[in-house]
Image (cartoon, rainbow, N blue to C red):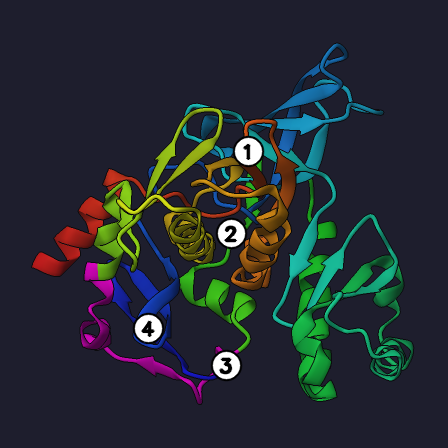
Amino acid sequence: MKNEIVLAEPFLDGSAVALIKNGIIEDFFADFISSQNHLVGTIFVGEVDRVSKGLNSSFIKLPDAKTGFLRGNKALNSGDKILLQSTHFTPIDKAIVVTQNISFKGRYIILTSKNKRISFSKIIKDKNRRLELLELVENFGDSRIKNVGIIFRSICLDSSSKKILKDLSEQLLKHHNVFNSKLNSICQLVKAPNALQKAYIEWNNFDDQHITKEKGCFDDFSIWEQILELKKKMVNLPSGGNLIIEKTQAFVAIDINTAKNNSLSSAFKVNVEAIKEIPRQLRLRGLGGKIIIEMGPLLKKYRKKIEEILLYNSLSSDKLRIAGWTNLGNLELEKPRERFPLSNFEFDQIEKNLNE
């Protein structure tokens, strides 16, 4: 992407990687020492502990004495060993949300285990391109492809067949290894991707030609200083207004405060600045779930424009969904809890790393 670069440098026992646009950090992954539950994407062998008919769900024994929460209880009994995958971030004191619909996410394709259809990113609209991708599947010389569903990701729009087929083969091998595992005991089969792997999967411009990998490269753009700014609840906006971002147990609350000039035109300007910045702040802070935005003064006729600006400034990986507007004029959003939420525990690791 234009004016974007990727930087990666050693961090603790792993890596930290940042997506930079015009000198500003747009996205970030790091291999923190985890204080949280298993990360999204981890695949386990679990054992059904108990089935709750009232909740239509099951509680699952997982590795490290953790508990999983599985919605739906059809054909499950206590003691059953089953394959599971974590789907959402969950706090350390909550059960890990898991699914039996295991997927394998690559840079170009996603394999699904239950839905065995072939589908495409909504970015791939051209019929001829879709037919070309379908031909790749039809001519693929591996019978195991009949046992999976395939989602072609947006990057397939203009990627070479060679790269797509290589990714397809790699994900098929992972699928084969997992579904041919012996379900003898509770264990972790597949770790969640590390920071570099996440960046490779999520960022279209992540490749050896556009990435700088060297110790200290973050210093050129004050990346760590930008990340440490995320400790603050307040985010200042160019025209003098600000955002206040607070995470509660139930939802994320965002308050848009306008500048001293409280005219409708001034307030609209602040609202636009805030809406442009909110997807980035949620992404970097690792916040998801239900999000409620208290707007500055805003006429109803501008609500559609605000929604368009919000989605335009979101990345596809944000998966932001507009739920609607409340009677009081608050904008409600939903975003999967797939990100690692930054807390003082992670900020302390950054500061320790900087001081070493």
Pointer 3 residue = 1
Q: CA distance from mark 3 to mark 1?
A: 35 Å
Residue at position x 83%, y 79% in the image: 126
Q: Which of labels 4 and 1 is toward the front?
A: 1
To which residue does mark 1 refer? Answer: 329
Label 3 with label 1: CB-CB less than 8 Å: no
Where does label 2 land, which residue? 191
Q: Quadrant of residue 166?
A: bottom right
Q: Which residues are magenta?
A: 205-225
Q: Residue 182, how many percent across, how many down?
A: 69, 44
Looking at the image, do the residues carrying marks 2 and 3 touch, with CB atoms under 8 Å apart?
Answer: no
Local SS, label 1: loop
Q: Earlier in the sequence, mark 2 or mark 3?
A: 3
* Of the image marks 1 and 2, the number of the one nearer the N terminus: 2
Pick whichever, 269 or 42, lies toward us: 269
Q: Is residue 223 magenta?
A: yes
Q: CA distance from mark 1 to mark 2?
A: 42 Å
Q: Amino acid at mark 3?
A: Met
Q: Position of residue 271 (x, y in %)?
A: 44, 50
Residue type highlighted by circle 4: Ala
Q: Residue at x 51, y 37 (%)?
A: 291
| Residue marked by disc 4 | 8
CA–CA distance in space, label 4 to label 1: 41 Å
Quote the CA–CA distance across marks 3 and 4.
Answer: 17 Å
Point out the frontmost of discs 4 and 2.
4
Report the amino acid beneath label 1.
Gly
The secondary element bearing badge 2 is classed as: loop
* Residue 87 visible somewhere in the drawing: no
Residue 322's place in the image compared with 198, above or below, is above
- Based on the displayed image, in which of its 4 quarters is residue 157 positioned? bottom right
Mark 3 Cα-neighbour bin, 10 Å: few <14, some 14–19, many ≥20: few
Which circle, 1 or 2, is nearer the viewer?
Answer: 1
